[in-house]
Amino acid sequence: MSTDDASAETTRYLLFAQPDEFSYKQRALEDDAVKTFAQQPPLAIDVGGGTISIVDPGGNAVISSAPIHAVTATPGTYAPMDQSSESTSRRYTQPLLLLDAPGGLDVRIGILPMRVTTWTGHQFRYAWRRKAQPLDLDAAYRHERVERRPLYVVTDAEWHSLVETFGLGNLAVDEYASGALDSEAKFMKVIGIGFAALIIVATTVFFVWFIWAIATGNIHHHHH
């Protein structure tokens, strides 16, 4: 949650620890978000005066800082594999903003899921456009191309503000405002219901055929 220091024209973004897991029930997901943002944030980012600083919000001690022009802002995603199946499906695709600069500034900032449904799984308000070519952080972890570091979350509005601050606004899309989330949910629901109906029809046809086959003698019981 950002705060503005009018005298120094500095905006502070509070970074909260990302939950280990996201709930699969909407009410619980919303409750978890409230709990997450009610905790003491371990870090904060101050942006202003041409500088970005990582700060301990408890005592305002500066942990690291760098000129904004020296900061590399990279689009990223965290899309962990579904370990419960043998497929290569992802549990969700969380958009991230990766910030690093000389001097130890290295943070990975995401957002919490906006909602979860049976048909679509977890949905996030923002997503990177394909041309952003976001770094797949989960794949980078597994191939040891980058170190596994904590993920932090901010509110949707603050994440978008940070993305704009570092000049990546044209690479992010508001999936909620564009209607993409609703369209995906409706499409997946239709697919899911259609698939379930197909299974029911196929099962019914099989049993009808099976009963008919027995009644007409097309299936014989063998006695030994």
Image (spheres, helix red, strand yellow):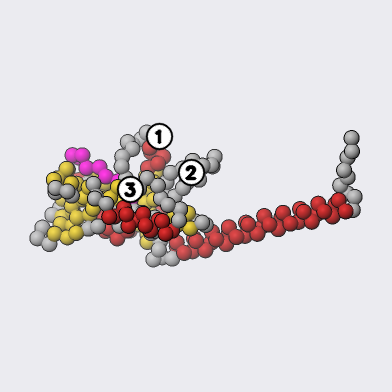
Along the polypeptide, which appears first: circle 2 or circle 1? 2
Please state the extent of the stretch shown in magenta in the rendering. 102-110
Mark 2–mark 3 Cα distance, whole angstroms, equals 19 Å
Across and down, in percent, residue 106 comes to 25, 42
Answer whether residue 223 is visible to the viewer in this image. Answer: yes
The residue located at (21%, 50%) in the rendering is: 44
Answer whether residue 98 is visible to the viewer in this image. Answer: no
Q: Nearer the viewer, mark 2 or mark 3?
A: 3
Side (left or right) of 80 relative to 170: right
Across and down, in percent, residue 113 comes to 39, 55
Label number found at residue 82? 2
**Nearest the eye: 200 or 160:** 200
Along the polypeptide, which appears first: circle 3 or circle 1? 3
Q: Quadrant of the N terminus?
A: bottom left
Residue under numbered circle 1: 143
Mark 2–mark 1 Cα distance, whole angstroms, equals 17 Å
Q: Does the magenta stretch mainly form a helix, a strand or a loop? A: strand
Q: Secondary structure at mark 3?
A: loop
Give amino acid for label 1: His
Residue under numbered circle 3: 18
